[in-house]
Amino acid sequence: MRKLIAGNWKMNGALVANQTLIHALLDGLRAQPAVCDVALCPPAVYLAQVQALLHGQDAIALGAQDASEHEAGAFTGDTAAAMLHEFGVRYVIVGHSERRSYQGESDAQVARKAQRALAAGITPIVCVGESLLEREQGQTEAVVARQLAALLECNGNRVADMALAYEPLWAIGTGHAATPQQAQAVHAALRARLHDALGAQAADVRILYGGSMNAANAASLLAQPDIDGGLIGGASLKAPDFLEIIAAAR
Ligand code: PGA
């Protein structure tokens, strides 16, 4: 399966810095073309700028960081999936743990966001993952299974057209990535549940790993049989690091 490397800028960026970063990435990918899919997920306010900077090339696709669970209407501050689609957005992260924690997004809400994204023609990247306490209590598999079950309950076999991202909370932004073995174990568990629900199609669902993936650890994580790409936060803001991660995805 072709891997996907997606950069999650979170609430970082500025007009000039975005331009510098994207020019460096495009130069790097011209010199060494990727053999994986690549996406950038800037803050919503920069989507038009990044769309323009990416115009006329197909090495990097545009992504977004969130989409509303509603189609349109009185939801101040939110962005509809159809609006993202108008700006050329191909992927959207939904259910990132920062949104689940700080915005109180529930499993069911995340599942509806994914449904809206798909209906608008955008591939959702649905994040799942456990806290440190949940891991220490041996609940990792139960937590990600619950999150996936909500997605399946709402979307049925349409989940086959989505991507998942396993992002253990304790690994995000900490510099302490999951080991390849820890990550692979959870990815394999997710794959098994997808197989129960979707049958053979489960093999085609990309399951990304996220949480302190960097230039040094990307190759060993991406070599695992059920790790089909990465969702990269901090390291996606530095062109040389992000390019090294892309080069490791083969
Ligand atoms: P990180 O973030 O790479 O900075 O740990 C990943 C994410 O939260 O998507």
Image (cartoon, rainbow, N blue to C red):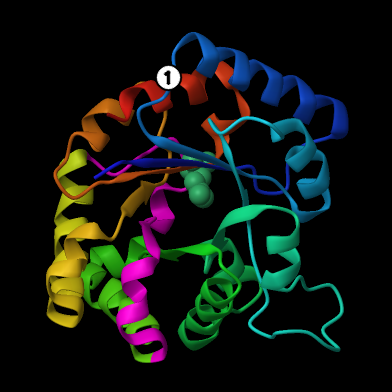
In this rendered view, identify the residue nearer to me: 201 or 187.
201
Which SS class for mark 1?
helix
Left or right? Give the position of 18 relative to 27: right
In this rendered view, identify the residue nearer to me: 124 or 56.
56
User: Residue beneath label 1, please?
Assistant: 244
Query: Is residue 155 a member of the stretch shown in magenta?
Result: yes
Q: Residue at x 64, y 64 (%)?
A: 66
Q: Residue at x 61, y 79 (%)?
A: 104
In this rendered view, identify the residue nearer to me: 142 or 200.
200
Left or right? Give the position of 59 relative to 215: right
Query: Is residue 231 a member of the stretch shown in magenta?
Result: no
Q: Which residues are magenta?
A: 154-179
x and y percentages locating residue 73 in the rendered image: 83, 88
Q: Amino acid at mark 1?
A: Glu
Left or right? Give the position of 229 relative to 212: left
User: Relative to 243, is 159 above or below?
Assistant: below
x and y percentages locating residue 213 in the rendered image: 40, 36
x and y percentages locating residue 195 in the rendered image: 14, 73
> The N terminus lies in which quarter of the figure?
top left
